[in-house]
Image (cartoon, grey):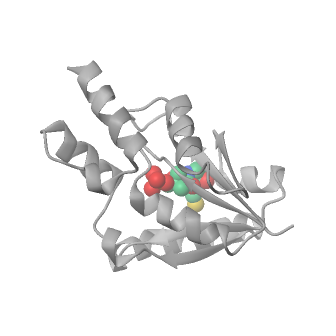
Amino acid sequence: MRRAVCPGSYDPATNGHLDIIERAATQFDEIVVAVLINKTKSCLFEVADRMAMLKEITEHLANVRVDSWHGLLVDYCRANGIATIVKGLRAVSDFDYELQMAQLNYQLSGVDTMFMPSNPTYSFLSSSLVKEVATYGGDVGHLLPATVHQRLINRLAERT
Ligand code: PNS
């Protein structure tokens, strides 16, 4: 079984995330989309909501499941028999930090990272910018799966 993990905060998942997950799913027998819990980062959505959104948008992918983890990513990989981390790279600016994490993760555990170039349509896209634009009333409907977009609108309305 060739199993890989697509880790992230997914606060919330965007079309860019989904594109990477869909493409990774064609390369491995199983993809685990793991919501990594970082207690120092303040997120808009609860972990359960982020997972629910990921389940909704990956429903059509038979070999994709969604999970969450608090701790080191490589410990999650070890505990779940995962040999590969898949990360999307949007631009050169992503590369420095991603390379550093990939090399450290490999040294810590032998778990390797494969980088997948993002679809150029989404190379500018990040969850943080989507949230910022939406907070000030900008239209982000074309950047998110429909169900995520609706939940984002609802969540922002709850906050105000
Ligand atoms: O979506 P993000 O916030 O860019 O994802 C970053 C994430 C969650 C993949 C990264 O911070 C991570 O792997 N966190 C888990 C903790 C860990 O293993 N840290 C050491 C990395 S070398």
Residue 36 visible to an observer of this rendering: no
The quarter in which the C terminus is drawn is top left
Q: Residue at x 24, y 24 (%)?
A: 157
Left-right relation of 5 to 14: right
Viewport quadrant of the N terminus: bottom right
- Seen from the viewer's position, the closer of residues 52 and 8 is 52
Task: Please say whether residue 150 is visible from this viewpoint.
Answer: yes
Picture residue at 82% right of the left edge, 49% below the top: 79
Relative to residue 67, is residue 78 drawn left or right?
Answer: right
Residue 36, placed above or below residue 77: above
Q: Outermost residue toward the right? A: 1
| Rendered residue at 27%/49% (across/down) | 141
Image x and y of residue 70, in percent: 63, 39
Say whether residue 67 is left or right of residue 152: right
Decide which of 108, 71 is in the foreground and name it: 71
- Image position, residue 124 (x, y; %): 28, 67
Camera-nearest residue between 114 and 64: 64
Question: How many numbered marks appear?
Answer: 0
Left or right of 87, for residue 90: left
- The residue lying furthest to the front in this view is 60
Q: Is residue 31 above or below residue 67?
A: below
Q: Position of residue 75 (x, y in %)?
A: 74, 51
Q: Residue at x 81, y 52 (%)?
A: 80
- Residue 65's x, y, as percent? 69, 49
